Structures are given as C-alpha cells and as structure tokens.
Amino acid sequence: MDTSPASRGSAAPGSAPGPGPTPDPQRLPPARFAFDAVTWREIANLLLNLPMALIGFVYVVTTLSLGAGLSVTVIGLPLLAFGLGGCRLLGRLERARVRRLLGVHVEEPRPLRTRTLGGFLPWLWASLKDPVAWRHALYLAIRLPWGIVTFVVTLVSLFVLWPVLPFLARGMSTVDRALARGLLQPSDELERRIAELESDRGVVVDTAAADLRRIERDLHDGAQARLVALAMDLGLAKEKLLEDPEAAAKMVGEAHGEVKVALQELRDLARGIHPAILTDRGLDAALSSVATRCTVPVSVTVDLPARPAEAIEGIAYFTVSELLQNVSKHSRARHASVEVWHAGDRLMIQVRDDGRGGADVSGGSGLAGLAERLDSVDGLFVVASPAGGPTVVTAELPWRDRESKRQAARRG
C-alpha cells in the first residue's frame, strides 16, 4: 500500500463521523396511495398544527403586546424580554416536533450568552435585540392561518378524500418543513460557526487549565521538592565543614548529584511545555527527537514547504508525542512510522504502528483529549485501529505558515 505523502496529498483522510444525514423531502419515500409510517407521522403533524399554532399565537400576541404597551413603564421592557425568551422555548418545542414527526433535523441556535453580559441592563438589551427570539416570534405568529388550513383539510380528507390524503399530507408537510428550516434554525452559517467557536473556546480553556495544573504539580512534586532537600543537605554540610570535613565533602558530592537530577527534571518539564528544539529547528528535528525516546523503532518523514505558525506547530508536535507514547505503552508494536506533509491548506499527520490494534477514541487512552484539542482549531482526528492491528491515526490541522502570518500582521 502506498503511504507516501504525495499519494495522500490530493485527498483529505476520512473525518470523524458526524450526525447522520439530514432527512429532507427529496430523500423521503414517494407519496403513494398506501399509508406508510411516514404518511401517518405527517398526518399527525398536520393535526397538531392547529393546537400548537393556537398556543403560539396567543402567547406571542399576549406577551409582546403587553410588553410593547407597557414599555413606557418600568416593567414593560423586561416583560417584553421575558416574552422573547419564551418564544425561544416554544421554538425549541417546535423543532423537536419537526424532528420527530417530519424527519427534519433543524439545528439548535446558539443560546443567549447571559453569563457574560454583566448585569441587568446588558441582559435586557441583548434579549430585546435577539434575532433568534424575533424569528421564533414571527414563526409562532404566522402559523395560525396555516394551522387552521392544514387541520381542516386533513380532518376532512380523513373521512371524504381518503385516497388522496397521502399526497395532500406530503404537500402540506413540505410547507411545514420549509417554514421550520426558514425560521427555526440558525439564520446563517456565521451564527452556527459562532456556536461552534464558543464550544471550542471552552475546550481550549479547560485544556490550558489542565496543563497549568500539571506543570504546577510537576514543579511541586519534582524539582521544587528536590531543591528544598538540596538546600537542607547543603546546610548540614556547611555545619559539618569544620568538625568533619570528610563527611561534609561527601554530602556536597551527593548534593552535586541532586543538582544534576533537578536540572534534568527541569529540562524535561520545559520540553513538555515547548521544546527548544522545536522552536530552533522545526518539526523535522523535534519529531525525530521524540522518535528516539519511543520504545519501538520509529521512522519519521517530514515534507513541508515552510514552517507553520507556532501554535499549529506546537499542536502537531504534542499530538505526535502523545501518539508515540501510546505506541510505547499499549501497542506491543515492532515498528511505527510518522509522516507529516502539506496538502492544500492543511497540515497532515499520520502515525501508524503494526501493534495489536483496538485503540478507541472513547477508551480513555488520551485520544479523546487529542481529538478535542484538534477540533478546537478546526482540525480533524481519525483513528482506524481494528483488533489485531495495524493502527493508523490521521490528524489534520489548518495550514498557517509563519510568513503569511507576519504579512497579515503587517497589513493589519
């Protein structure tokens, strides 16, 4: 099998499985005279349209008219804001009904960021200008006439126009699907992207906090404890210097050995934060250094036209480092390989070994953390590890080279 970077540069590797395909009218079974499960669900949805539309219409008209009418008083605008929040909740119920009965997955809009608004007045302003809530209010307001039409037509057809009811149900349900997609889902790709970035920001913050805790623990339990013991030993040696020079010299020699160990621990800790070889010489040299510490032979191939941005380079380094640690600890492999190359606007990484396989992102081996870290920068992380091996882990990162970043900074 050809595993060279060139053979894979033209196509990205498979990505992690996402949610299943979104059903839509084009993928539904064709309407026919027979009443199948899809048709019965569409009929149930059409019969529910009227009661749900009545609830929504009465709620919108009551709360929004009261809020607008009382806006000259202290309670008017807060009442309007709470009413818009209720429109969001009713919109969530409608999305659930559309998903269950019409098979249409309508994405959830991002929630109103109440925790970061910093007080009542910012919350009030954000609630009043919330585009999601106003679209939901519009949806609830215009549904009443359509709900009456669909309820009456469906009810009459159940007793009079039975043979053509499947076709009528399909046509009216198609309108329902279009209304839900148009007014209940996020307004555009930007809003969905904001929701993803907010989620990714939480992952990055959690990862950074975990890294800081690890560094603090390593310093406290390792180098700091060793330096405290070293200071005590040197103090004792100082006291014995005149009365027992030989014992003092022995203690100083032992302290010298402790200094070397402490320095090595600090070097290892610094390497875990950001290795100097990566900063000075790039991924090729840094990954080759990592490979020498693996317990199995590792071949490293790095084919990059330039160096990526420091953040991307660091993520690539630590991804390969952790994957090779997994190879050493769990794989029982005889050989492993690391390949890094540039394809389009992506930095590609592939680590493979001929071990026993069975690696799983959800198996608690650290792979889930790697997947989250890559996802936070728009990367991909794919594990193929059948029982018996081999294991192939492919990672993609966005390509941002240092020169382009400097030019963008100068333009800015």
Image (cartoon, rainbow, N blue to C red):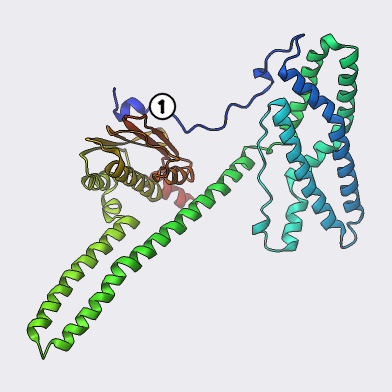
| Residue positioned most to the left | 246
Amino acid at circle 1: Ala
Picture coordinates of residue 158 (x, y %)?
87, 16
Instruction: Name the residue tied to disc 1.
Output: 11
Picture coordinates of residue 371 (x, y %)?
44, 42
Picture coordinates of residue 182 (x, y %)?
73, 32
Q: Is residue 181 above or below residue 118?
A: above
Quarter of the image that includes the N terminus: top left
Residue at x 90% of width, y 61% of height: 73
Q: Is residue 351 above or below residue 289?
A: above
Residue at x 29% of width, y 56% of height: 271
Residue at x 75% of width, y 38% of height: 93
Q: Is residue 366 left or right of residue 50?
A: left
The answer to which of 310 and 328 lies nearer the viewer is 328
Q: Is residue 185 left or right of residue 319?
A: right
Residue at x 16% of width, y 69% of height: 257
The answer to which of 42 and 311 lies nearer the viewer is 42
